[in-house]
């Protein structure tokens, strides 16, 4: 049994204990917990239920205290790692996957990435310009321009849409053409991004509905905003469209 938890602790220590040479240890005296812990299930339950029922934090409380009685070992990881605890670092780490020589590569037989199988069809890309981007399965890109972006599963992107420096999560389901037509006829917004919309440096969560003739460019450079009634937030000057939100036709952000 193992658990993966995302925690982050930075400590100044003697890193020769972890196998670095004296010289290397002087250059690299800090260790950060990557938050990946492998713990026997019965030990974990005992720690949480009996020994430390009030503890909130593995890295600061439970593991250091458990080390007094249990066998606790740390392994050094001296490779690419990124903390994605802020909106900006999350966006930048995702976009970095599109670099010419990405620091992390998914395209490596020796490091397989296991994800849930969805058996989606390949993406259908019609008359579009796609540069420096990653496009997931099941997308429909119709006469649009996508640059330096990561596009998730089942994304539907309409004609004359321009997307740049954007992470789009995609959708959990498809909307059939008849459903899309019905929504459009009623003046409502189907899942995906409607015609003529321009988006720059934005995070779009799953199942978002972004209308036609929308501009998400944060032209005024707003740092922080909570406009959830209109379907968005701005964090560290990055517009974020939360899950299931709708951005109405013609909106300018
Ligand atoms: C792609 O383009 C072809 C030719 O214009 C058209 O028949 C087809 O419906 C288009 N697909 C989409 C998803 O727009
Ligand atoms: C694609 O969009 C461009 C404008 O971005 C437009 O000029 C062109 O007619 C469109 N092509 C199709 C097949 O819709
Ligand atoms: C897209 O923009 C063109 C030119 O401004 C306009 O003629 C067209 O109606 C727009 N499309 C939609 C769906 O609003
Ligand atoms: C494409 O959309 C832009 C707005 O982003 C608009 O100015 C332009 O007229 C549209 N082009 C066409 C061919 O619809
Ligand atoms: C999004 O909508 C789905 C149903 O369409 C619902 O199950 C889910 O809880 C919603 N999530 C959020 C964060 O609103």
Image: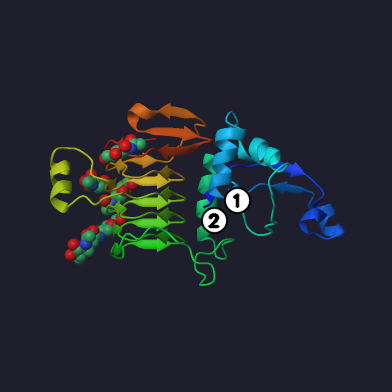
- Separation of marks 1 and 2 at Cα, in angstroms: 11 Å
Q: Position of residue 214 (x, y in %)?
A: 32, 40
Q: Nearer the viewer, mark 1 or mark 2?
A: 1
The residue drawn where x is 67% and y is 57% is 77
The residue carrying mark 1 is 82
Name which quarter of the figure residue 229 lies in. top left
Q: Nearer the viewer, residue 177 or 49?
A: 49
Q: Residue furthest right?
A: 22
Contact flag, marks 1 and 2 (Cβ < 8 Å) = yes
Residue 247 shows in the view: yes
The residue drawn where x is 66% and y is 47% is 33
Quarter of the image with the C terminus is: top left
Residue 45 lies, with reference to residue 156, above or below; the image says above
Numbered disc 2: secondary structure: helix
Q: Position of residue 236 (x, y in %)?
A: 53, 35
Q: Nearer the viewer, residue 13 or 213?
A: 13
Q: Position of residue 215 (x, y in %)?
A: 36, 41
The residue drawn where x is 52% and y is 58% is 97
Count residues near mark 2 (Cα–Cα under 10 Å), then give few for <14, some for 14-19, many for 20+. Answer: some
The residue carrying mark 2 is 96
Residue 71 - label: none
Q: Is residue 146 left or right of residue 3?
A: left
Q: Residue furthest bottom?
A: 109
The residue drawn where x is 31% and y is 49% is 171
Q: Is residue 61 left or right of residue 186?
A: right
Count residues near mark 1 (Cα–Cα under 10 Å), then give few for <14, some for 14-19, many for 20+. Answer: few
Name which quarter of the figure residue 188 lies in. top left
Numbered disc 1: secondary structure: loop
Does the residue tagged 2 have its C-beta within 8 Å of any atom of ligand 5?
Answer: no
Q: Is residue 170 left or right of residue 134?
A: left
Q: Position of residue 52 (x, y in %)?
A: 61, 33
Residue 177 lies, with reference to residue 232, above or below; the image says below
């Amino acid at each position: 049994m193992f658990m993966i938890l995302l925690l982050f602790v930075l400590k100044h220590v003697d890193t020769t204990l972890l196998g670095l040479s004296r010289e290397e240890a002087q250059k690299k005296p800090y260790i950060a917990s990557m938050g990946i812990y492998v713990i026997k299930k019965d030990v974990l339950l005992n720690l949480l239920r009996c020994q430390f029922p009030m503890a909130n934090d593995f890295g600061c409380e439970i593991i250091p205290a458990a080390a007094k009685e249990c066998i606790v070992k740390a392994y050094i990881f001296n490779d690419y790692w990124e903390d994605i605890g802020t909106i900006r670092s999350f966006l930048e780490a995702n976009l970095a996957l599109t670099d010419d020589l990405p620091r992390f590569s998914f395209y490596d037989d020796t490091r397989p990435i296991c994800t849930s199988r969805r058996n989606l069809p390949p993406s259908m890309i019609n008359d579009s310009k796609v540069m420096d981007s990653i496009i997931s399965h099941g997308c429909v890109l119709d006469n649009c321009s996508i640059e330096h972006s990561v596009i998730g599963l089942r994304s539907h992107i309409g004609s004359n849409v321009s997307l740049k420096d954007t992470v789009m999560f995609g959708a959990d389901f498809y909307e059939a053409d008849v459903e899309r037509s019905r929504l459009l006829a009623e003046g409502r917004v189907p899942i995906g991004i409607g015609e003529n919309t321009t988006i720059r440096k934005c995070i779009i969560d799953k199942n978002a509905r972004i209308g036609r003739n929308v501009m998400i460019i944060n032209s005024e450079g707003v740092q922080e905003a909570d406009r959830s009634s209109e379907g968005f937030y701005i964090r560290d000057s990055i517009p974020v469209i939360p899950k299931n939100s709708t951005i109405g036709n013609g909106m300018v952000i």
